[in-house]
Image (cartoon, rainbow, N blue to C red):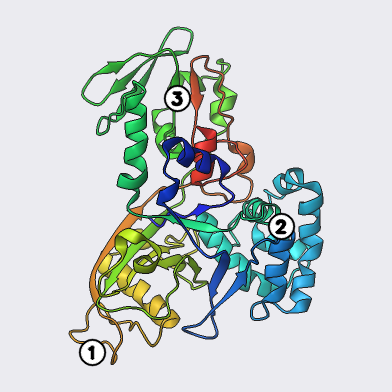
Amino acid sequence: GLHIFFGAYPNMMNLFSELDLHDRLQWKQHRMAFAMRDAPGKFTSFEFTPGVPAPFGMALAILRNTEMLSWYEKIAMLPALLPMLLEGQPFIDAQDELSVTEFMRKYGMPERINEEIFVAMGKALDFIDPDRLSMSVVLTAMNRFIRETDGSQTAFIDGNQPDRLCKPIVEHVRALGGEVRTGVPVRSIELKEDGSVAALLLDGGERVEADMYVSAMPVDVFKRLLPTKWLEPASASAEFFEGIEPLKGIPVINVQLWFDRPLPSSLDGLAFSRSPLLSVYADMSKSCREYEDADGRGVMEMVFAPCTIEAGADRDWLKCSDEEIVDAALGELANLFPLEIAPDSRTAASPDGAGGERALLRKFAVVRVPRSVYAAVPGMGKHRPSQETPISNFVLAGDWTAQRFLGSMEGAVLAG
């Protein structure tokens, strides 16, 4: 997947420090780059000036950009943003019942702010369109970015995450005497008479007993394994665990495209597409050391979202073929890079067939994730449980549990 690390991820940075992996982070120029919808092949950005402290850095970056929002539109954002800055998290949490578009109407914000800013942020934060996304998600991100000088600066890890991040975590756990096992899913949670956990029954019949049990499963998986005894009306745990029922993961698709030539106008770093089907994307041949190509050939990785009708798409893309998804992604990229990528890049037999000197597709990969981070639709905040549960020897972890970083790697690390 296209995983990005932000400066506003202190717990993730602490993890990198503990593992001594900071040298694997490739920090990018501090900016937020957006593809220009009305000027194909061009970008505009919020450029952050080094040394300007928060909250002035973000304010200056937005004010200096003259291509996205007019002065009137920038001023029109203030009545909504001032309470966030003055009241902080209580105000942000109170907006969870409103969608982004409902919040905008409440504060009289012009629609262009949604088109220029919030569409990109919504699809990047939760793979969903603004009319379905809780405003608390957008405000939480904006609050961190505004209050922290380097909060919105991004970094890529220098290679594939299984080798460059996950493997060192496993080695660290084993060095401390722990054990990491994969390929042995939990079949059920066995209970004692008092309702506490007695053991985990693994696929294959093995029982694992422990003093304490921590579940870091995604919410959809956890709900399938939730013991029925914990939901019995007479039990003290029923109200707690019934509360999570409305929570569920949001679907997303990741698409990787390898081209036969460089893409000169692509950026070194993350870009917001603001197109109907693409969320964020990056040319990994420029952004990630492992994907560098001796001939400079482009490697585009992108988040394809929304990808179901429920999330805002016009069809269920999860059920479409890889070729259909890739062709749709190429159509979007052809609008963003009209001189470099043709919509028929996958099927064209020659550069001429793809439109002169435009790139041909060498290979592709499509990764479907039917349930990823929890769907942050309006009203879901109150259903996110604490990590502490009514069960004496059982605790929860995961980005869907209650913590201030929402559905993200940072939220998962903090909750764990």
Q: Quadrant of residue 243?
A: top right
- The residue under the point 64% across, 38% down is 382
How many marks the image carries: the answer is: 3
- Number of other residues with Cα within 10 Å of mark 2, as a class: few under 14, some 14 to 19, many 20 or more: some
Viewer-closest of 55 and 193: 55
Left-right relation of 153 to 75? left
Q: Please give the residue where the numbered disc 3 appears in the rendered image.
A: 214
Image x and y of residue 88, in percent: 76, 47
Viewer-closest of 21 and 348: 21
Image x and y of residue 274, in percent: 52, 72
Q: Nearer the viewer, mark 1 or mark 2?
A: 2
Q: Please give the residue where the numbered disc 1 appears in the rendered image.
A: 353
* Residue 128 seen in the figure: no
Left-right relation of 2 to 135? left
Secondary element at tag 3: strand
Secondary element at tag 1: loop
Q: Earlier in the sequence, mark 3 or mark 1?
A: 3
Spatial CA span between label 1 and label 2: 51 Å
Q: Earlier in the sequence, mark 3 or mark 2?
A: 2
Q: Which amino acid type is shown beneath numbered disc 1?
A: Gly
Image x and y of residue 2, in percent: 41, 57
Spatial CA span between label 3 and label 1: 55 Å
Residue contact between numbered discs 3 and 2, judged by CB atoms under 8 Å: no
Viewer-closest of 202 and 160: 160
Q: Please give the residue where the numbered disc 2 appears in the rendered image.
A: 53
Q: Which amino acid type is shown beneath numbered disc 2?
A: Pro
Q: Nearer the viewer, mark 3 or mark 2?
A: 2
